[in-house]
Every structure is written in structure tokens, then in C-alpha cells.
Image (cartoon, rainbow, N blue to C red):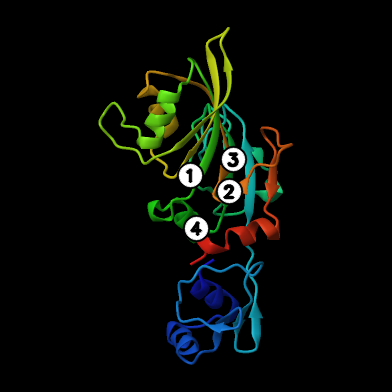
Amino acid sequence: MRLDKLIEEALHTSRKEMKRLFLSGQVTIDGTKERQQNRNVDSQIHKIMVGNQQLFTDEAYYLLDKPAGVVTANSDLNHQTVFDCLKKADRYPDLYAVGRLDRDTSGFLLLTNNGPLGYDLLHPEKKVTKVYEACINEIVTETDITKFRDGIIFLDGTQCKPANLEILQIDTKNQRSYIRLTIWEGKFHQVKKMFLACGKKVLTLRRLAMGPLYLPENSQPGDYFPLTKAQLTLLKPYFR
């Protein structure tokens, strides 16, 4: 949550009073004077003080194991949305998905109402990793691994950053490959287009991780989990 918004809501300050609080050094985060009014904070991982008064936030963070067939949207007339996967009590106002997964893609999706955090996690300069596992319709080769490492070029000429492609299993009988892919960007339909550029098609795609957060090993499509304090602490570098 933005620090100035938190102070305004908690202390009902005017803009002039807000400025005075910061200039006089009365606003501290973890014991350090804070001058940045739009600083993103969460009281689960920050000690937020204004004078002698401690302030508390109430942000929501859910790690959803998105099922295939569910759309990443607030509402849809024809399909179930990611928010339909939540219990009504957990559908906080302003909750949104950090990034999108295609309707036929399953796996890791972060839902939160902390706008600044989502913005930073998606910002290209942050180079947040995304890890996927996929089934490919042909045999993936060492040549493909090299192409991914060098930076795939889409059929339209778009250049991708280097990516780490691993072969997990080869099914020679059915001419299928099972792979793990780590990328550091988030272009539209990126994983599918990367393999298409190699003359191959993604049959199934599942995201396992984003940045420092991973789906629990026992997670099943449709499950969701509130972030623990330990998980939220891993995201602290993305609170600016």
C-alpha cells in the first residue's frame, strides 16, 4: 500500500499536514526516516511509525493454482474467472491478477490488491523470473536449447532475451517432450511463440513460479493459498 494513502486513511491528514510529517522526520519505516511519500509498504514486513503511532495495512495476497479453462479476468460471460476460484469472503475489493495466464495455461498466479507491488513484479527492469513446465508435440533437441540460450526470434522478428530450456523427459514412442523453461520477461503468448519459432507446438503449459515464489509441491489446480509472512518477506525487494 502506498505510504501516503495509508497515512491519509489512518490519520485523516491534509496534504499540508502530510508534507510536514515527512519533512519533520516523523515518518519512519523499520526505524529509518522515510522521505518517499509513495513508498510501498505492508505492516506484515515493515514497522510503520508516524511519531509514536504504529500504522497497520490490510492488503490481500493469494497464490492461486489456476486451472486450465479459467480466464484471467474480473468477469466473463462464457467462462469461469480466476476470482471465481476464491471463496466469497476472500474476494477483497480491488483484487487483481499480477500478469495473465492464457485460458488453457494452468499454474502460478498471484492475486493481490497491492497495486505498486504488482507493477514492480511486472516491470521489465526487474527481470523477474518465470518458470514453466510444458509438453511439446515433438522431440526437443540440444539445438533448441542453444536457440533458447541465444535468444529466440519470433516469426515476426521480435527478439527474446536468453532463456533456460531444460529437457525433463523424452517420449520417443509418442514423439513428445517434457521440458522446464525459465524466462526473464513476459511477452504476449511468449512460451508458445518461442516454440513455434522452432517449428514446435506447446500442448500443455503450466507455470510453477514467479520470482522467489513457487507453487507448493502438493498444489492442485483450483487450490489457492494466502501468502505467509515468510513468502511475503521474499517479496520485500519489490517493495519500493
Q: Mark 1 is on which residue type?
A: Gly
Vertical relation: 67 (above or below) 34? above
Q: Which mark is residue 108?
A: 3
Q: Mark 4 is on which residue type?
A: Gly
CA gap between label 4 and label 1 equals: 12 Å
Nearer the camera: disc 3 or disc 2: 3
Please give the residue where the numbered disc 4 appears in the rendered image. Answer: 115
Whether residue 80 can be seen here: yes
Mark before the other along the chain sequence, 4 or 1: 1
Residue 196 location in percent, x, y?
38, 22
Vertical relation: 139 (above or below) 163? above
Judged from the image, the secondary structure of the residue bearing numbered disc 3 is: strand
Residue 175 location in percent, x, y?
52, 11
CA gap between label 2 and label 4 equals: 10 Å
Q: Mark 2 is on which residue type?
A: Leu
Mark before the other along the chain sequence, 1 or 2: 1
Q: Which mark is residue 99?
A: 1
Neighbourhood count class around disc 2 (C-alpha, 10 Å): few under 14, some 14–19, many 20 upward: many
Nearer the camera: disc 4 or disc 1: 1
- What residue appears at the point 48 percent right and 60 percent down from the top-left corner? 116
Judge by depth and name the residue closer to the eye, 168 or 4: 168
Mark before the other along the chain sequence, 1 or 3: 1
Judge by depth and name the residue closer to the eye, 55 or 12: 55
Marks 1 & 2, CB-CB < 8 Å contact: no
CA gap between label 3 and label 4 equals: 18 Å
CA gap between label 1 and label 3 equals: 10 Å
Please give the residue where the numbered disc 2 appears in the rendered image. Answer: 111
Marks 1 & 3, CB-CB < 8 Å contact: no
